[in-house]
Image (cartoon, rainbow, N blue to C red):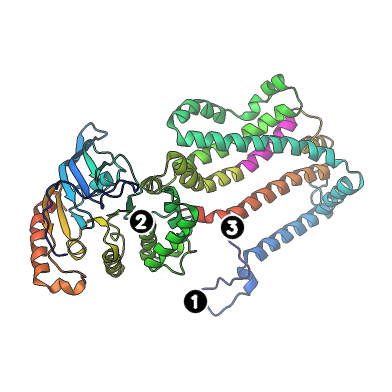
């Protein structure tokens, strides 16, 4: 994402005398403004009846439903908890396996040659297609969904980790060797740091896939979870509740990937070659 | 130090103290080094062909030649980064079997880790060769001060100019206090002015403690300015064409370019190099 914009003025020396106000150049102001305009328009078309509430609930209605769910009845929490557990366990497994296997596959050709056919096969198979099989093995409880979430997230991390390891600058590796570095030292001090930004980018890409997997897994077979809630609300024409559920996914995804972007900008920029 | 000692194999260099690593003043003997590899298309490329060379300790020796003459490969063989197909390198009386802490390499590209600051890069070299932590710090600061890097310790490589980065690269090599400094066209990537400044710096540092230096270059003037001895190499396959002593007094500076001895040497080196350069089509 963009670096910190603050209120820097992006006017060049060749800008004509017709000055735009300073806030115009600030991307944050424009972004906020565009959201405000959008939400207002949304409220307008829904509350005036241009679009019927069954097709699109107004932002205020959604807010009211959210308030009810979170602060009055508290019905939402068990759903969030179930989805969260699936997502966290599946994602954690995807990170651990993706990073470790990726490091091994990137570093050792024989590991890559052994694992590659299976990785490719699984990568090409839509993981949801495997859900019936997983349900057969693990039942419709937590673990079949964890497996789907894991499969959804692992490949982005795996592929990026491999690329990061293999992309480590050979001149830096040679330099470390010139200073009598062992293979382990080369790996720890040169390859691993060089691969770090790739690994984090892979994790960031995986966030979206993990959320998709949570939703789809709950869509197919479940009786709880935010994905289940969305499906249920849709089937009972409770558009406001449905949209609120969707927004939970949206917000979770945005917050996670934005925080990772921030970490990347703030701490990982130096790991990239200039 | 304007003596032109013969370069043929000598008997024995004086033995060093037994408790120190068995290095005898940084003397290097390359004995019948050949190196070749097979290309993808099945043809064999001869990089080095029976190269024999003796470099006495405490001398500054340049390997001068056109690209493709194997000078960089020879340097890497001396360092131990490349194992030659045939032949043996001995340092003092020990055979080279891999990189060692008695030799340090300065590369053409600075090759600094971009995520480490200048001083961390210098410390990294010390750490890898196994120098204790507190000693490491002292050495890194010393080497950086020597290279005029005071105040730049905490800069990241991409905050430094090309010349400064190369200074860090040299500081990293010096900080491990090697017997032998191997330099692979260290100033090749720098602009002309920076290059001259760096050459002068290198002379100043070298004259202070006279390590053995093997310096790869394709610049005739650079080799004259810096070296006690110039090893002229030819290409296809890489071999030694001539070994020439530089008979100019030290300390040296750019003024000497007008010295008739410089001019003569330059002419002679050019005559030796010319057929090699034409042959490689450069």
| Secondary structure type for disc 3 | helix
Q: Main secondary structure of the magenta part?
A: helix
| Secondary structure type for disc 1 | loop
| Secondary structure type for disc 2 | loop
Lateral position of residue A138 relative to residue A124, left or right: right
Residue B73, given in percent of the width and then of the height, sits at: 25, 45
Residue A138 on the magenta segment: no
Gap between marks 3 and 2 measured at Cα? 36 Å
Q: Which residue is mark 1?
A: A13
Question: Disc 1 vs disc 2: which is toward the camera?
Answer: 2
**Quadrant showing the N terminus of chain B:** bottom left
Gap between marks 1 and 2 measured at Cα? 52 Å
Which residues fall within the magenta stretch? A206-220
Q: Tell me which chain the residue with mark 1 is part of.
A: A
Residue at 44 percent across and 45 percent down: it is A168
Q: Which residue is mark 2?
A: B177
Residue A5, given in percent of the width and then of the height, sits at: 61, 65
Lateral position of residue B235 relative to residue A45, left or right: left
Q: Quadrant of residue B214?
A: bottom left
Q: Is residue A274 visible?
A: no
Determine whether A134 is above or below A184 in the image. Answer: above
Residue at 55 percent across and 70 percent down: it is A10
Gap between marks 3 and 1 measured at Cα? 30 Å
* Mark number displayed over residue A266: 3
Badge 1: few (under 14), some or many (20 or more) residues near its Cα, within 10 Å? few
């Amino acid at each position: 994402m963009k670096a910190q914009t603050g209120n820097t003025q992006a006017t060049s020396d060749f800008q004509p005398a017709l000055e735009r106000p300073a806030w115009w150049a600030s991307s944050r102001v424009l972004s906020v403004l565009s959201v405000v305009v959008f939400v207002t328009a949304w409220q307008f078309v829904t509350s005036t009846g241009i679009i019927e509430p069954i097709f699109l609930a107004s932002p205020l209605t959604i807010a009211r439903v959210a308030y009810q769910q979170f602060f009055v009845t508290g019905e939402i929490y068990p759903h969030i908890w179930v989805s969260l557990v699936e997502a966290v366990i599946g994602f954690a497994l995807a990170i651990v396996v993706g990073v470790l296997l990726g490091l091994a596959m990137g570093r050792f050709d024989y590991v890559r040659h052994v694992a590659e056919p299976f990785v490719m096969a699984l990568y090409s198979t839509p993981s949801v297609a495997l859900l019936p099989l997983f349900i057969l093995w693990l039942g419709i409880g937590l673990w079949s969904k964890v497996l789907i979430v894991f499969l959804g997230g692992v490949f982005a991390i795996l592929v990026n980790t491999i690329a990061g390891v293999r992309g480590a600058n050979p001149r830096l590796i040679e330099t470390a060797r010139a200073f009598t570095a062992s293979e382990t030292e080369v790996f720890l001090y040169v390859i691993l740091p060089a691969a770090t930004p790739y690994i984090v980018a892979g994790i960031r890409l995986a966030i979206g896939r993990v959320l998709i997997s949570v939703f789809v897994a709950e869509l197919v077979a479940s009786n709880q979870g935010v994905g289940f809630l969305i499906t249920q609300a849709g089937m009972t024409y409770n558009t406001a509740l449905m949209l609120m559920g969707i927004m939970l996914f949206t917000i979770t995804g945005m917050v996670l990937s934005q925080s990772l972007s921030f970490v990347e900008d703030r701490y990982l920029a130096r790991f990239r070659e200039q | 130090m304007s003596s032109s000692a013969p370069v043929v194999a000598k008997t024995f260099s004086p033995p060093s103290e037994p408790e120190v690593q068995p290095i005898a003043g940084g003397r290097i003997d390359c004995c019948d080094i050949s190196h070749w590899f097979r290309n993808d298309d099945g043809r064999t490329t001869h990089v080095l062909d029976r190269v024999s060379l003796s470099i006495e300790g405490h001398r500054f020796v340049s390997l001068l030649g056109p690209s493709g003459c194997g000078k960089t490969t020879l340097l890497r063989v001396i360092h131990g980064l490349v194992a030659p197909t045939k032949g043996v390198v001995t340092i003092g009386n020990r055979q080279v079997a891999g990189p060692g802490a008695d030799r340090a390499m300065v590369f053409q590209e600075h090759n600094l880790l971009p995520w480490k600051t200048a001083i961390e890069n210098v410390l990294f070299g010390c750490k890898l060769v196994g120098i204790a932590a507190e000693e490491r710090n002292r050495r890194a600061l010393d080497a950086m001060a020597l290279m005029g890097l005071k105040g730049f310790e905490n800069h990241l490589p991409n905050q430094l100019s090309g010349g400064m980065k190369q200074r860090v690269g040299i500081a990293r090599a010096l900080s491990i206090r090697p017997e032998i400094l191997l330099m692979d066209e260290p100033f090749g990537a720098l602009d002309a002015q920076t290059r001259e400044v760096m050459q002068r710096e290198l002379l100043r540092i070298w004259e202070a403690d006279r390590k053995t230096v093997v310096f790869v270059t394709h610049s005739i003037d650079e080799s004259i300015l810096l070296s006690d001895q110039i090893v002229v190499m030819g290409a296809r396959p890489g071999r030694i064409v001539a070994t020439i002593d530089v008979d100019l007094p030290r300390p040296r500076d750019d003024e000497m370019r007008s010295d008739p001895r410089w001019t003569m040497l330059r002419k002679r080196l050019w005559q030796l190099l010319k057929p090699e350069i034409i042959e490689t089509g450069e």
